[in-house]
Amino acid sequence: MLKSPIVALDFSTQEEVIAFLQPFDEVLFVKVGMELYLQEGPSIITAIKALGHAVFLDLKLHDIPNTVQSAMRGLAKLGVDLVNVHAAGGQAMMEAAMAGLMEGTPHGQERPKLIAVTQLTSTTEQQMQQEQQIPLTLEASVKNYAQLAKAAGLDGVVCSVYEAAMIGDSCGEDFLRVTPGIRLAGGEAHDQKRVATPDSARKDGSTHIVVGRAITQATQPREAYQAVKNLWEGY
Ligand SMILES: O=C(O)c1cc(=O)[nH]c(=O)n1[C@@H]1O[C@H](COP(=O)(O)O)[C@@H](O)[C@H]1O
């Protein structure tokens, strides 16, 4: 899977996406989330793939196993590189998601990688304990979800940079640690709580970073992308 920063295309129309991608002359790894997918539908994936970019379809599925399995069977046909579910759906749901992906992947094509969201990067330990009533440290909760995902046969998890190294130790170095909540030093955190810079992500165990507003809302998005990429790659 491409190692370059995953750019979150949090736009609502295909026109905005095409305008954003237009100045880039390299292959990108982009993320299509619920804002874009729920408004444009599967045709947005076809349009982005036609430009040659790799796609993470981030729909964070979380439902009963049968429903998630059927949904994944359909999504597997889109030819995306990476999809996700919420680990809070449980091990049986994650196993069903993987089964659906295997059933739906067309013969001769590679199965999309499947990862599970642990604790959202917009969540603090205090919120988790008080609102979700989970009587653990945030790190212990993330570790529990990561181990469930591993037991279910998934390829990795979404977590913050702060838990990435611990998950590498506990689930293996080849287990993906995809980390959003990435900001350039001094950048606005917005609604994110567990934020880190691209260079700390590289040093602290992330296998992939997800970057949205620090690039998409920059006055010069292509330059912002290059700055993130250089820090991530250690230049
Ligand atoms: O699954 C995700 O991609 C995700 C999980 C998570 O815990 N936190 C998180 O921010 N994300 C996504 O990553 C992106 C982060 O966007 P920015 O905060 O603008 O960089 C958004 O598209 C979120 O939907």
Image (cartoon, rainbow, N blue to C red):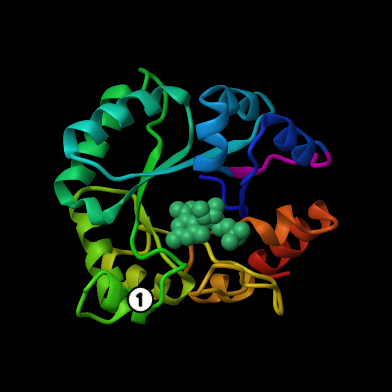
Res. 178 in view: no
Query: Which residue lies at the image location 59% right of the left edge and 27% below the top edge?
Result: 44
Residue that appears at 25% across and 63% down: 145
Q: Is residue 151 visible?
A: yes
- Between 5 and 185, the residue placed more toward the observer is 185
Query: Is 153 placed left or right of 159 in the picture?
Result: left
Horizontal side of residue 121 vs 191, given as left or right? left
Q: Position of residue 154 (x, y in %)?
A: 28, 48
Give the amino acid type for the residue marked by disc 1 in the picture. Gln
Q: Position of residue 146 (x, y in %)?
A: 28, 62
Label 1: which residue?
127
- Is 65 in front, or is 152? 65
The answer to which image quadrant residue 23 occupies is top right
The answer to whether the beta carbon of the residue marked 1 is less than 8 Å from any atom of ligand 1 is: no
Q: Could you tell me which secondary element the residue under label 1 belongs to?
A: helix
Q: Quadrant of the C terminus?
A: bottom right
